[in-house]
Image (cartoon, rainbow, N blue to C red):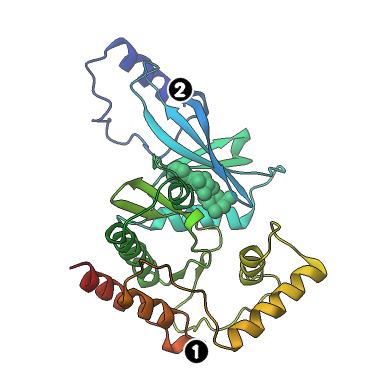
Amino acid sequence: RCVLRELTEIMNKNPDISLSNPLPGMNQSVFHKRYLKKMRDLGEGHFGKVTLYMYDPANDGTGECVAVKALKQENGHVPDGWMKEIEILKSLNHCNIVKYKGLCTELGGQVVQLIMEYLPLGSLREYLSKRKLGVPQCLLFAQQICEGMEYLHSKRYIHRDLAARNVLVENDSLVKIGDFGLTKYIPEGEIYYRVREDGDSPVQCLILRFCSPFPLTSGLLGQMTVMVLIKLLEKQLRLPCPKECPHEVKILMEQCWAADPSKRPPFSSLIERFKGIRQ
Ligand code: ADP
Ligand code: MG
């Protein structure tokens, strides 16, 4: 730490030493709390809170913007699930997956924060609420999300929480998958076909949030809603398609909603289909 401080001081006094050309051996994935300047809140979900910071070790405004994810509840120890989420993101490298940058630890390791690249247009959910996308842009985003998912699966991970709030927008022609909080690794030889642990499944929570006017309805009302929904799905009823949705996309959506999972197209074939429709 002392060495780093000294280095930073030397750099401050000698602005011609370029920060983009760091000294060999300098760990760039360690972010120091004291150089993180809070800019604004970016969003939050069930477990995490994400904040925009400027990381500016030179303290001259030339720093970079980073998104910092912290757990909402800190109680003196770092939960396993949180470290898993961090390790998963660290192991991923794809243009449609948010990039890991490093960690910031506090209190001798009792608090760990995840540093990622900042995507200026926020979540796809917010983005969609502010503008109306044309069909070509929808198809491009859909294809990019599938590319990210296909890569994830090639690494034997399943995301389990793919939703517009967990997709991030870089610009009008690039989206990336974020939030690996519920992601699971499926070891070689194992087939993912059912949930083993109780309360392990995000599905019930998702269904409730989908169809209930209240956020996360539990109890009797929630159970009734799920039962009604299951009945509708059993009758092969599905959401209607928007008016401007191309016919090929409608067919594709219906295939993805097939009751029998083995009949649903894999991401690899979805990518090819989206490419075909976009031409
Ligand atoms: P949680 O695990 O609590 O759901 P997320 O990782 O989904 O947390 O982040 C919560 C919200 O913060 C997202 O829906 C998005 O609005 C915002 N966000 C997350 N990561 C970034 C990022 N890298 N750049 C910009 N906004 C982000
Ligand atoms: Mg989320």
Position of the C terminus, as image quadrant, is: bottom left
Q: Contact, CB < 8 Å: mark 2 with mark 1?
A: no
Residue 191 place in picture, x, y as percent: 49, 84
In the rendered structure, which disc, 2 or 1, sits on the residue that comes first in sequence? Answer: 2
Q: What element carries label 1?
A: loop
| Residue occupied by mark 2 | 2
Which residue is at a point 27% across and 71% down the rendered structure image?
274
Q: Which residue lies furthest to the left in this view?
A: 279
Mark 2 is surrounded, within 10 Å at the Cα level, by few (under 14), some (14 to 19) or many (20 or more) other residues, namely few
Which residue is at a point 56% across and 62% down the rendered structure image?
182
Q: Which residue lies furthest to the front in this view?
A: 243
- Is residue 247 shown left or right of residue 90? left
Q: Does the residue labelled 1 lie within 8 Å of ligand 2?
A: no
Where on the picture, by quarter, is residue 248?
A: bottom left
Where on the picture, by quarter, is residue 241?
A: bottom left
Please tell me which residue lies in front, 89 or 236.
236
Mark 1 is surrounded, within 10 Å at the Cα level, by few (under 14), some (14 to 19) or many (20 or more) other residues, namely few
Amino acid at the residue labelled 1: Asp
Which residue is at a point 47% across and 85% down the rendered structure image?
258
Q: Residue furthest top?
A: 13
Q: What element carries label 2?
A: helix
Please tell me which residue lies in front, 186 or 265.
265
Which residue is at a point 62% across and 82% down the rendered structure image?
232
Residue 103 place in picture, x, y as percent: 48, 41
Q: Measured along the vertical axis of the image, is residue 25 above or below residue 55?
A: below
Residue 186 place in picture, x, y as percent: 48, 75
Distance from the alpha carbon under mark 2 to that under mark 1: 60 Å
Residue 266 place in picture, x, y as percent: 37, 79
| Residue occupied by mark 1 | 260
Please tell me which residue lies in front, 145 or 102.
145
Q: Measured along the vertical axis of the image, is residue 207 above or below residue 176?
A: below
- Is residue 19 shown left or right of residue 38? left
